[in-house]
Image (cartoon, rainbow, N blue to C red):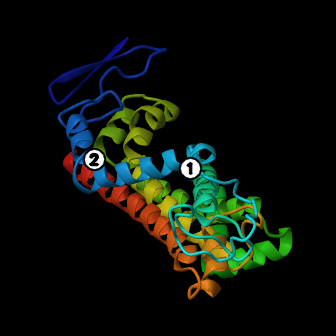
Amino acid sequence: MSVVELRDETVLLTGDESPATVIGGPGPDDSGPGRGGRWRALLRGRGLVGLILLGLLVLTGLLAPWLAPYPPNEQIPGANLLRPSAAHLLGTDHVNRDVFSRTLYGIRTDLVIVFVAVPIGALLGTLAALLGTVLGFVDVALQRAFDVVLAFPTLIFAIGLTAVIGPGAVTVIIVIAVLETPLFARLLRSSILKVRSLPYVETAEAIGAGRPWVLRRHILPNAAEPLGVQLALSLSLAVFVESAMSFLGIGVRPPQPSLGSLIADGIDYVDSNLGFVLGPLVVVVILVLSLQLIAQGLGAARRVTR
């Protein structure tokens, strides 16, 4: 056993154990005054409003089979482009389907796509960042690949990928995941490099802590903080990507409803039934707004803990 004295504190090292204490090294168990303040900052103001709006939309999507007055693809006899009424809250479309019912199912479709695609992109980006910070030559290759992906405008990239693999919900998920991977990878990579150069990490390595232990105990818990904000922003961006792809006809295929395809179908019938396009459009705005508010709440929570 060896004894190392640092800043009037003593660290005991054994041959098979990691440092018990590292001066100035915050870790995942450090509760401090910031943890409670972080949740209070998130659960008030804009963050609370965003969570409430998102929760209502998620609940609406989950309960769509029970809330929808009609099946989403049912063609109602004699109900062609009816205006909003008590029987049809958003009217009917050009093939006699209830727009309100299709909007409810469209919410479900969009939520499934964005909540599957963005976490996949975040996971791939995290793995790429970790691999790149460990292996320098891999990092160089990944950064050049990310440059190529980010060089294309979003819709151009989506159209090109759709031309290769065909349209559909799976294509939308792949497009979003590929576009989000470089964002998460570069954010986490930058944060890891910043944290790795801090004094407490250098101290841990100097007194004999192994690199895997330092990475798990000190670097990742502190470097991953910005990912929460990025996750909320990426979810809002994914809603736009899905809506744009479906609006252009390269996303979710009919007759499966999505918010983007509903807007695309209804824009030609504004004079006959304004609810046809206005209902899905309002839902898209609320969904994006709720995620943006959550991102702002997470940003405020981070500032509280500093």
Q: In this view, does 141 lie above or below 157?
A: above
Choose mark 1 or mark 2, whichever is in front.
Answer: 1
Residue type at mark 2?
Leu
Image coords of residue 148 (percent x, y): 66, 75
Image coords of residue 223 (percent x, y): 40, 47
Image coords of residue 247 (percent x, y): 65, 77
Helix, strand or loop under label 2:
helix
Residue at 52 percent of width and 71 percent of height: 84
Residue 225 visible? The answer is yes
Residue at 48 percent of width and 65 percent of height: 283
Residue at 23 percent of width and 52 percent of height: 303
- Residue reaching furthest front? 78
- Residue reaching furthest top? 1
What is the total number of numbered labels drawn onto the structure image? 2
- Residue reaching furthest left? 8
Residue position for label 2: 42
Residue at 38 percent of width and 54 percent of height: 53
Residue position for label 1: 61
Residue 186 visible? The answer is no
